[in-house]
Amino acid sequence: MHIPDFLFGYSSLGVPLGILFWIIALVFVVLAIKWARNNLDESKIPILAVIAAGIFALQAFNLPTGFGVSGHLVGGALAAIVLGSPFAAVFVLAIVLVIQALVFGDGGVLALGANIINMGVIAGFVGFYSFSALKSRVGVPISAAVAGWLACVIAASVCAVEIAIIGAVPIGVGLPTMFIYHALIGIIEAIITGIVVVLIFNVRPELTGNTEKKAMPVNKFLAIGLVIALIVGGCAVFLASGDPDGLDSTLLVSGGAKDIFAPAHGEIEEAHDPVGWESPMPDYVLGGEDAGAVGGLIALVIGIFAALVVILLAARIVYAASGRKSS
Amino acid sequence: MSLIDELFDIEREAYRNSPIHALDSRVKLILCLLGLLVTVLLPYGTAELFAFMVIYMLFWGLYILSGSSLRYYLVRLLLIMPFGLFFIILQPFFPNPYYAVYHVAVTLPFGVHMYWESIIFGLSLFAKFVISLSFIILLSATTTMQAMLEGAARLRIPRLFIVVMGLTIRYLYVFALVYQKIQSAFAARCFNGFDRRLPLRYRLNVIGNAAGSLFVRALDQGERTYAAMCCRGYSANSAVFYAAKPLHAAEWVFFLFGAGYLIVFPVLVYWIF
């Protein structure tokens, strides 16, 4: 479910959307930090940090799905249920995802916002509230399992919607695929979440009470509602532009696409023209009548190599000056 | 192999010495993010392929200088790929909106077609994928997590975030070891989560309990750590001190030329092609 960076390269709107997801995610991370300051006595934030390391290790367990495929725990619902707040999940998963993106390359850096929204915010909130709604009716194990399944499936569906908004995979293809795949993986996540929650509630019964905490303060509720409304509204704007073509043309990139095939078929519509910045001189062809192109090319190649030499030399000088110590 | 096993390999690699390892982590962080951004931003077209080559050359120049092995690069690349590949492999099967005309390359049963244009588009995505991952691999192979954190602190990332990340990174290794102990315990008892001779229910139960005990250990460790920190004078307003560290002149040159390279050459490639 970790969205990689390259998916944001589909359209000219990809990067602005990536930044928008970042901003939404940051709003939730800030809310989570505020929650931690207000609800954990005397800034017990270090505890959450250590639990983030624990969740990271937990994700390493390969789970047999019974179909020969393996999946692993996401842990958003689990963190929210055990720590007694969806904000705990946002906090913990945000830390885990930053490390995964920067150190492991699992999930992109530009995509980090979207990933925190899916696996931290959506999974955390869905997991926590479905657990607290069901707990008194069906008991802890079943409600934890259902919460785990819902968190996994809904987060994956939102992920598919985001990918469709970016323009990477049409919603008609992405949503069913992600839904079916994660509905199966989710069963395993559900069972493991159920077992882990029961075990923790048995070993550390003092945690049980946490899930029945006070209702959310009105202003916080409003802020969250507003953000969710913005997300839904944003999706609606893109989807409401009608049929898939409407969505697609909103997100149209095409870039230099026409350069490849236009000469051969001459049927590319002008509507597919790139947005100005994408290719300053789209019709300029190498080896054309203009001999200046060759000169420019040679200069460019020399320039590239010269710059490479300077960059690598500078690195060597730093190394020599640093007395061969890594920083 | 999971991320946990990779954790130790990455750190071992990051603690080696080389010109790239010796660079200030701020320079590496910013250049890596810039490289990613430029790669992602490149619009689709013929010129893009050359611009990719230019960016990829910078990566290889730096990677070779860092002295890391080709094998290390390939193994890490392969480990990260699966989820992204899923999107790329889907590409050839549907006409995306980026072309007006489509040519069927292969017709499969049930009316499924593969399109030439979409195959080429998928390949371009694949290039973006590989290059953006390469920069992350280069960053993490040449910079320790603590160095990245110090760099982030010097770049004025909020204090609270640095404190929390610092703790998480330290305990990552503790829990990686706990995880490995659990795996050894499984192995010592001949338990394998993928052993089909055991009922699935039993296997999941064992794994679930192991995962639960790991979580409980994390909770306990968190409380112990917090108590220990309080004993040593931690409070809500404490911060870790990172001394100011001005960049070496050559580091400035490296940074400015690196950033210039990443911005100017892809643009120039567009001008010429």
Image (cartoon, coloured by chain):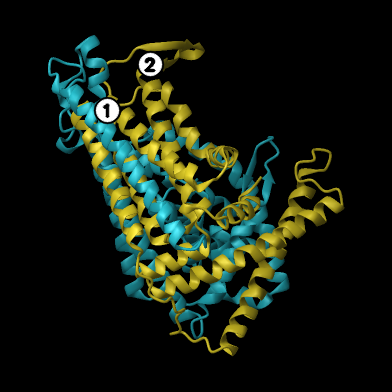
Chain colours: A cyan, B yellow
> Is residue A150 placed above or below A135 in the rendered structure?
above
User: Which picture quadrant has residue B68?
Assistant: top right
In what element is the residue under mark 1? helix
Give the residue pinned by disc 2.
B116
Q: Amino acid at mark 2?
A: Trp
Please tell me which residue is depicted at 70% across the width and 61% down the height of the picture.
B177
Name the subunit of mark 2: B
Give the residue pinned by disc 1.
B47
Q: Amino acid at mark 1?
A: Ala
Q: In the rendered image, is residue A165 in sight?
A: no
User: Which picture quadrant has residue A185?
Assistant: top right
Q: Can you give x and y, in whole percent of width and height, for residue B6 in the image?
A: 62, 50
Q: In the rendered image, is residue A199 in sight?
A: yes
Mark 2, other Cα within 10 Å: few <14 / some 14–19 / many ≥20: some
Please tell me which residue is depicted at 33% across the width and 46% down the height of the picture.
A310
Name the subunit of mark 1: B
Quadrant including the C terminus of chain B: top left
Q: Could you give the CA–CA distance between mark 2 and mark 1, rounded to whole angstroms? A: 19 Å
The front one of A254 and A91 is A254
In what element is the residue under mark 2? helix
- First reached walking from the N terminus: tag 2 or tag 1: 1
The front one of A278 and B243 is B243
